[in-house]
Amino acid sequence: MSLNTIEHLIIHQLHKEPNGPARVALAPAALAITPAAQRLVDQLCEQYGTRNGKGFGQFADDETMVMPQLVRRFSQAHSLDFTGFSRELMAELQTRMEAEPLASGGYVLVAQVNNAAMRFIFIALLSEVIGTAVNDELQVVDSIHLDMQHLRVAGRIDLGSWQAGGERYVSFLRGRGDVAGYFKQFLGCLDVKTPLKETQKLVKGLEAFANEQAIAGDERDELFQRAHSYLDALGEGQGEVALATVAEQVFPTAPAQLQAALENEELGINDGFVPDRRAIKPLMRFKANAPQWKVEFDRASLRSGAVIYDKYSDTLVLSNVPEELKQALLAQ
């Protein structure tokens, strides 16, 4: 049984060769939700959900952007039905695609879907691929079908989060070299890139990765040291984060593993932000407080013995107390 309930589904076609004009072929009406249509949407939603390299954001606060107006007219004002919404959407996509010389056309799937997680509009550009089949006469023949394995251009609008005033309700596949940049513009999406928040999410992702991979001791210290050094240099030089490069610098033995972890949709990290150097301190230092004390120390102190935590007695022992602190304590 499918976890996705398809409210509306339509597929249009956009003809365009690289460096050529764009031409639209519109479907006359929405599609019936057949088992084949359900399988198609289910496969696309699953693939989109598991794909790495997404951007996240919200509608740009710009009245010239078409998509926010269309979504508002369709989902809130109800002055557009689904077919009309998809047709106006296609006109905007045609305009954006014509401004991108290297973009190529395909079938444009537009769906409104409900599942346990969200109610959303899903848009994907699909191309055809030639496969192989055996016909009734047991002859090998070409079989043309939709290329489901190489989804490169797609986006999703979380209607519930948008209506609730969320900040990250639009997502899209970034593609290599931002090849789908025109599609982000088509979605009317403004990336949400608050350096402090994005850096905090990146640090959280690095810590989660170390835990999942059971990286401990000196190896863990070295991992965090590499991450801190690289991100600190980026922050000082105003360089932007690219998760693929972070993975290569921080975990060179298996960068693809770390990249996949950092690009997990639940983390929702956006590429392209300058690290906030304040937010990377937890990679090198522990900082905590209780009602009667505060403490901060380097992670390496746990390896050197300068700081000892006894989990059985639930005590923290600090060694090499500086003379100034000793005198202050003795004066109490």
Image (cartoon, grey):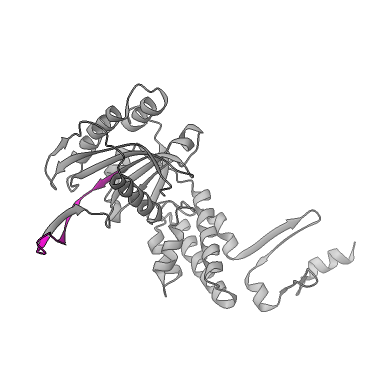
Give the residue at x 24% y 37%: 93
Measured as percent of width and height from the top left, residue 77 is found at 40, 22
- Which quarter of the rendered picture does the C terminus lie within? bottom right
| Figure check: 81 above or below 278 | above
The answer to which of 309 and 321 lies nearer the viewer is 309
Task: Tell me which segment is drawn in magenta.
Answer: 124-141
Say if residue 248 shows up in the picture. no
Measured as percent of width and height from the top left, residue 246 is found at 42, 63
Give the residue at x 54% y 76%: 219
Which SS does the magenta portion mostly show? strand
Q: Is residue 266 left or right of residue 112?
A: right
The answer to which of 258 and 106 lies nearer the viewer is 106
| Figure check: 257 above or below 111 | below
* 138 is within the stretch colored magenta: yes
Name the image quarter holding residue 302.
bottom right
| Figure check: 323 above or below 131 | below
Q: Is residue 204 left or right of residue 59?
A: right
Name the image quarter holding residue 242.
bottom left
* 31 is within the stretch colored magenta: no
The answer to which of 289 and 134 lies nearer the viewer is 134
Give the residue at x 62% y 64%: 285
Measured as percent of width and height from the top left, residue 41 is found at 33, 46
Q: Is residue 177 left or right of residue 24?
A: right
Measured as percent of width and height from the top left, residue 249 is found at 42, 68
| Figure check: 283 above or below 301 | above
